Image (tube, rainbow, N blue to C red):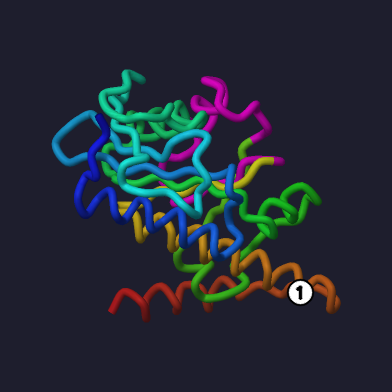
C-alpha cells in the first residue's frame, strides 16, 4: 500500500502541480522522479493520474531495474528514461520531463535556443537535441542516457524536454530557464531576429556569478 513518503513525496506532488499551473505539462503528460538516498530506488509520478491533482499517495516507488516496490498506480510510462538517466549519472537526484510548448515548438521548426539571456548562458551553455524516439520505450531511454553526460537538460525532438538536477528544484529551474529562453527567442524572431550574448560577455557572466 502506497505511503506519503514525507517531505520528498510532498515536493514531487507539488512539482507536478506547479508545472501544470505554468503550462509546462498537461493533465496527462509530463512526469518527474527523485532518487531515494542511499538506495537504487526512486519515487516517480504515476501514469493515468491528472497531474494537477496528484497527491503523496499516488506516487510509485520502484527500483532502477524496473521492479515496482510500492504504489497503487502504474509508474509513468517514461520510467525507462528516468531509470536509465539515474544509472548513467550517479550525481543526479531528480529528473523532470515536460512538454514545454515554446521549447518544443522551436525545436520542431529547426530553431536553436542560444545564449539569449544571462540565465540561459550560465545554466544551459549547451542544449542538445535528441532525435525522435517513441515515448516510453527503451530506445528513448538509451538515447537520452547516452547524451545526458555533462548536461542539465535535453530537448526531445517532437516530444518535450528532460532535465536533471542535484535536487528537484534544480531540475525544475533548468526547465523554467530553458522555456523562458525559448519564449524570448520566439518573440525576438518575430521582431526581426534573436541576438545572442557575445562569447566574451558569457565568460564575464560566468566569472561574476561564481564570485
Extreme residue in the left direction: 38
Q: Nearer the viewer, residue 168 or 116?
A: 168
Residue 131 drawn above or below residue 108: above
Residue 86 percent coordinates (x, y) = 34, 34
* Residue placed under numbered mark 1 in the picture: 187
Residue 189 percent coordinates (x, y) = 80, 71
42 within the magenta span: no
For the point 35% across and 60% down, the residue is 169
Q: Nearer the viewer, residue 128 or 172?
A: 172
Residue 70 percent coordinates (x, y) = 27, 28
- Element on which disc 1 rests: helix
Residue 32 drawn above or below residue 188: above
Left or right, residue 110 beside residue 169: right
Left or right, residue 209 beside residue 152: left
Residue 192 drawn above or below residue 150: below
Q: Nearer the viewer, residue 133 or 28?
A: 28
Residue 145 visible at all: no
Q: Quadrant location of the C terminus?
A: bottom left
Q: Quadrant location of the N terminus?
A: top left
Q: Which residues are magenta?
A: 131-158
For the point 41% across and 73% down, the residue is 206
Rate crowding at label 1 as few (under 14), some (14 to 19) or many (20 or more) other CA atoms within 10 Å. Answer: few
Left or right, residue 39 beside residue 63: left
Amino acid at each position: 500500500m502506497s505511503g506519503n513518503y514525507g517531505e520528498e513525496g510532498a515536493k514531487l506532488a507539488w512539482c507536478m502541480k506547479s508545472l501544470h499551473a505554468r503550462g509546462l505539462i498537461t493533465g496527462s503528460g509530463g512526469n518527474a522522479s527523485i532518487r531515494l538516498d542511499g538506495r537504487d530506488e526512486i519515487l516517480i509520478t504515476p501514469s493515468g493520474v491528472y497531474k494537477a491533482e496528484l497527491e503523496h499517495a499516488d506516487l510509485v516507488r520502484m527500483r532502477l531495474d524496473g521492479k515496482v516496490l510500492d504504489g497503487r498506480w502504474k509508474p509513468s510510462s517514461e520510467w525507462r528514461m528516468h531509470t536509465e538517466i539515474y544509472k548513467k549519472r550517479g550525481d543526479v537526484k531528480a529528473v523532470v520531463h515536460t512538454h514545454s510548448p515554446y521549447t518544443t515548438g522551436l525545436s520542431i521548426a529547426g530553431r536553436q535556443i542560444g545564449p539569449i539571456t544571462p540565465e540561459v548562458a550560465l545554466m544551459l551553455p549547451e542544449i542538445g537535441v535528441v532525435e525522435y524516439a517513441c515515448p516510453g520505450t527503451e530506445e528513448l531511454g538509451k538515447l537520452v542516457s547516452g547524451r545526458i553526460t555533462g548536461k542539465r537538460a535535453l530537448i526531445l525532438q517532437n516530444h518535450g524536454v528532460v532535465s536533471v538536477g542535484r535536487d528537484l528544484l534544480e531540475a525544475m529551474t533548468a526547465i523554467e530557464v530553458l522555456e523562458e529562453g525559448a519564449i524570448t527567442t520566439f518573440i525576438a524572431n518575430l521582431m526581426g531576429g534573436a541576438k545572442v550574448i557575445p562569447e566574451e560577455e558569457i565568460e564575464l557572466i560566468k566569472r561574476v556569478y561564481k564570485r
